[in-house]
Amino acid sequence: MREQYRILIVDDNKDYIEVLEMIFQTLGYESMAVDDGEKGLEALKNKKFDLIISDYLMDKMSGIELLEKIKDKFSDLKFLMISGNDNKGIQNEAIEKGADGYFVKGSDPQLLINKIEDFKKIKK
C-alpha cells in the first residue's frame, strides 16, 4: 500500500481551510488543519507531514515566524506560503526565508494542486 501524502494546513480562516480539506480529500491526500502557528508546531511534534501550507497573515504567529521555526527544526519539510495578497514583497520574503513556494488565495486551485504534485515528485 502506498503511503499517503500528508499536508498540514495552518490558517486562521476556517472557510478557506474547509475548501482546502475538500480538495485534498478528493485528491486522496491526508490533511490536518489548525488555526494558528503554535498549534502547527504542536502538530509537528505528534505526526509526520510532507508539506506545510501556511497563511502569511495570522493573529498569534505570522506565517513567516512559523516558517522560520519549522525550517530551523525540519529543514527538509516542504513549506508553501499562502496569502490573500498578491504582493511581490511578501512573496520574496517568504522565499528568502525558506518557503518552497507561494500561492495567492483566490487563484485557480489547479495551480495549487500542480505545486503540490511537484512537491510529491521531489519526495519520491
Image (cartoon, rainbow, N blue to C red):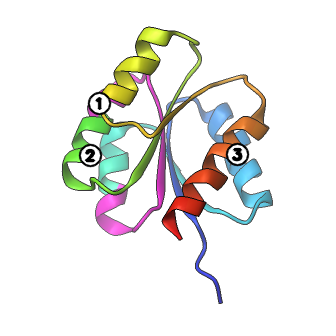
Q: Position of residue 87 (x, y in %)?
A: 52, 9
Task: Note whether residue 62 is visible.
Answer: no
Q: For mark 3, what is the residue?
A: 114
* Residue at point 58%, 79% (across, down): 3
The Cα atoms of the two marked residues, 1 and 3, are separated by 22 Å
Judged from the image, the secondary structure of the residue bearing numbered disc 3 is helix
Q: Position of residue 10 (x, y in %)?
A: 47, 41
Local crowd at mark 1 within 10 Å, few (<14), some, or many (≥20)?
A: few
Q: Position of residue 119 (x, y in %)?
A: 55, 54
**Furthest-left residue in view?**
72
Q: Position of residue 53 (x, y in %)?
A: 50, 42
Marks 2 and 1 close (CB-CB < 8 Å): yes
Disc nearest the viewer among 3 and 2: 3
The picture quadrant where one finds residue 14 is top right
Judged from the image, the secondary structure of the residue bearing numbered disc 1 is loop
- Mark toward the start of the polypeptide (2 vs 1): 2
The N terminus sits in image quarter: bottom right
The Cα atoms of the two marked residues, 2 and 1, are separated by 9 Å
Query: What amino acid type is highlighted by mark number 1?
Result: Lys
Q: For mark 2, what is the residue?
A: 71
Residue placed most toward the observer, 53 or 12: 53
Local crowd at mark 2 within 10 Å, few (<14), some, or many (≥20)?
A: some
Q: Is residue 19 left or right of residue 104?
A: right
Judged from the image, the secondary structure of the residue bearing numbered disc 2 is helix
Q: Is residue 33 left or right of residue 94?
A: right
Q: For mark 1, what is the residue?
A: 97
Q: Which residues are magenta?
A: 43-65
- Mark toward the start of the polypeptide (3 vs 2): 2
Local crowd at mark 3 within 10 Å, few (<14), some, or many (≥20)?
A: few
